[in-house]
Amino acid sequence: ALTSNQNYRYLMILQKVIGILFDLFMMILGPILICVVFTIVSGETYAFFTFLLPIYATYRSYVWFIHGAFAIFLAVNISFNYIMCVTSNPGTHDSKVYQQLMAEAKEEGLIGPGK
């Protein structure tokens, strides 16, 4: 029979192994989901220009160019914002830009003890 301390040790080992496996899974899943998002955005843009836009507007008409420009704007905007979300630091304040902005705000009196 196992003693209480042995059970605790086995549970701690199991917890650490599960934690390591979960971290590994998340590190693998992250890039896969990034690729999935870009595939969806690319597929939606392709489907719009291939199927939907020709139904709505004649090729190279004024309406075609306006809708096409707006669709490109949306696709680029979605991609840019997603890239910025993926590459930004999710919770620390160690970036040089953040430190510089905080120093400037303190100098200008925008933040501090009185605010």
Image (cartoon, helix red, strand yellow):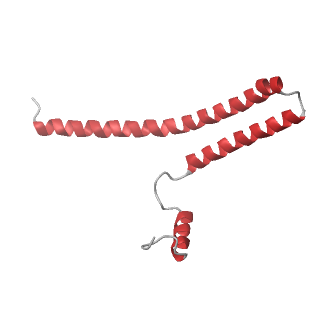
Q: Quadrant of residue 19?
A: top left
Q: Residue at x 48, y 62 (%)?
A: 94
Q: Where is residue 30 in the image (x, y as percent from the top left)?
A: 52, 39
Name the one closer to the observer, 109 or 78: 109
Question: Is 106 placed left or right of 59 in the picture?
Answer: left
Name the one closer to the observer, 68 or 115: 115
The answer to whether residue 111 is above or below residue 53 is: below
Q: Which residue is drawn at 63% across and 46% down?
A: 81
Q: Position of residue 56 (x, y in %)?
A: 81, 26
The answer to whether residue 15 is above or below residue 58 is: below
Question: Is 63 placed left or right of 87 in the picture?
Answer: right
Q: Position of residue 60 (x, y in %)?
A: 90, 32
Question: Is 99 placed left or right of 67 in the picture?
Answer: left
Q: Where is residue 69 in the image (x, y as percent from the top left)?
A: 80, 40
The answer to whether residue 17 is above or below residue 57 is: below
Q: How many marks?
A: 0
On-image quarter of the N terminus: top left
Q: Residue at x 56, y 67 (%)?
A: 101
Judged from this view, the residue extending furthest toward the bottom is 107
Q: Quadrant of residue 11?
A: top left
Q: Which residue is drawn at 53% across and 63% down?
A: 98
Name the one closer to the observer, 8 or 99: 99
